[in-house]
Amino acid sequence: MTAILSVADVSKAFSGVHAVQGTSFEVEAGSITGLIGPNGSGKSTTIDCISGFQTLDAGRVLLGERDITGQRPAEIAKAGMIRTFQNVRVYDSYSLLDNLLVAGEAFRDLNWFDALARTPRYRRVRDAAEDRARGLIDLVGLTRLSDAPATVLSYGQKKLLAFAAAMMAKPRLIVLDEPVAGVNPTRVNEVADILRKANATGISFLIVEHNVEFINSLCHKVIVLEQGRKLTEGTPAQIRNDPRVLEAYLGIARPAAAEAEAS
Amino acid sequence: MTEPRWTPYAVLVAIALLAALPSMTSSNYVVGIAISGLIFLAAAASLNLVYGYAGQLSFAQLGFWGVGGYCAAIAVVDLGQSFWFGIAFAGVVNLLLSAVIGIVITRTTRHAFVVVTLTFALLAGLIARDWVGVTRGPLGIPGLPPPSLMGFVFDTSARFYYIALAFSLIALAFLYVLKTSRIGLILKAVKQNDPLVESQGIAPGPYKLAAFVIASVITGMAGGIYAFNLKVIDPSFLDFYYMQTFLIIVIIGGAGSFWAVVLAGAAMVVLPEALRFSNELRMVIYGVVLVAVMMFMPRGVSGWLEDRRIAALRKALR
């Protein structure tokens, strides 16, 4: 399997606090990979570093073959990696449709004159983008609200909108920061289904999430961070049974964990 | 916000009324008010582009206004050029000036942006007062001649009015096309959520810079025309009164709404005059109106209307 994302020895410190220290991992092309770890283990900082929202102190990030280390967020997004935010971000005063149109990937080929003069080329792109946007709004089940301003959405609905906007940019890899935190529990399975459908079309995912059930049901591989370092990685089943992971989350003393393993 | 379907008709009626204004009144006073109103409106609409759309509170507009005024005056009086050349000269100088300033300050934080633009405005005022060799200092440049075009001299208020009207309509039409385009969509997205725009593969820098430069060119040309309306330019042209007028129009109307700012511009020109029935209390009532609007509609009239609409929508969805 080839890697869509390779993170090598990435480090980041904030005034002496080592948030991420030499973390390395890969996301295989076409996979759904989970990134878990206790609070403060460096998950968010890792995402910020690979998506260009934080500068790295050391290390390298490759998206496919392309070196994206230290590039600006917009460049990285155009290269094919789109991220969402833990504290969900949408354009509150814009309708759902406009939210998606801003993110539209097809507009990148047009210049400002096209936009100002509404050239035929521009109108073709816009019409196609609008069709695609309506399709994505259907996919996340918000059809009824497509012309309402995003501010009327619930927190969970905004997460769905943010996901649809990420899809709108036609990325190869989507990095989701807590996609189901705050989402109505009855809808978590629907979100998992939507992600599986998107994955089936060839989009790879890296997902940060605390909902273990969600991660286990969805991910091919799970990476565990602890104190800014990679603790381990493996299939969800391997991770579930790894005493070191329990220890990291629950703080069980190592001898006790070793005993449990022995028995 | 969506426009009502009758908007184009309302615009046509308004343009027809404005075009007929000088023939409806013989009062130079009324025409004079209308000239100021039209020019202020173009300047306020361009401030709205920077502040209401790109989300950057720019006090530099006052500086660009002054630079435009002086450039136009100097081009005509010292360089012996025509009024039209002077206005174009004002636009070009502001284009270069705002590009240089803009490249630096559109990268700063919003607070730093406010401070730097304010400093630029104050600096422009200082130069107008103290660089006597060019600006003639506190004495200013009096006796600006009336513009002429192919033998036709715009020497009365009624004639000059059409220059202000044409300029204002062209500027507003251009800003309207810009604001309703995808560029306007992205500018307001930048204002709402800068990191999200970046995460979607759009670098906000060029958009912020374009808004800043376009606004400065329009404001500078407006300043040039206004100087020839006054027929004199001196350091009081950089008085904070002008900046305050542009800001009040934008804030009362509602930053980020094209039509609300246009209507507020008209209202803010008419209101102080309409209050002349009580000359002593005129400015007091004007102040009370402003305070009341700010208390009850902190996001301007358009913000207030939008809040109503969203509240109604929330209720309907419940």
Image (cartoon, coloured by chain):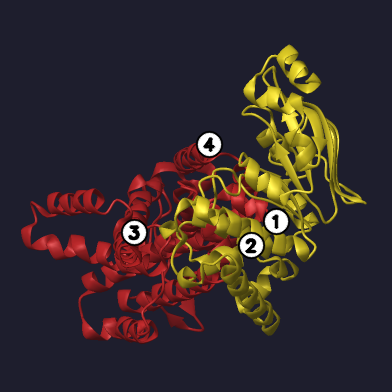
Chain colours: A yellow, B red
- Disc assigned to residue B201: 1
Name which residue type carries label 2: Ala
Q: Are marks 1 and 2 in contact (CB under 8 Å)?
A: yes
- Crowding at dot 3, Cα within 10 Å, few <14 / some 14-19 / many 20+, comes out as many
Quadrant in which residue B81 is drawn: bottom right
Q: In what element is the residue under mark 4?
A: helix
The front one of B221 and B267 is B267
Q: In what element is the residue under mark 1?
A: loop
Q: Is residue A104 left or right of residue A199?
A: left
- Crowding at dot 2, Cα within 10 Å, few <14 / some 14-19 / many 20+, comes out as many
Q: Disc 4: which chain? A: B
Number of labels in the image equals: 4
- Crowding at dot 4, Cα within 10 Å, few <14 / some 14-19 / many 20+, comes out as few
Circle 2 is placed at which residue position?
Answer: A103
Q: Are marks 2 and 4 on the same chain?
A: no
Q: CA distance from mark 3 to mark 2?
A: 25 Å
Circle 3 is placed at which residue position?
Answer: B303
Quarter placement of the C terminus of chain A: top right
Q: Is residue A50 left or right of residue B184?
A: right
Please say whether residue B68 is visible from this viewpoint: yes
Name which residue type carries label 4: Ala
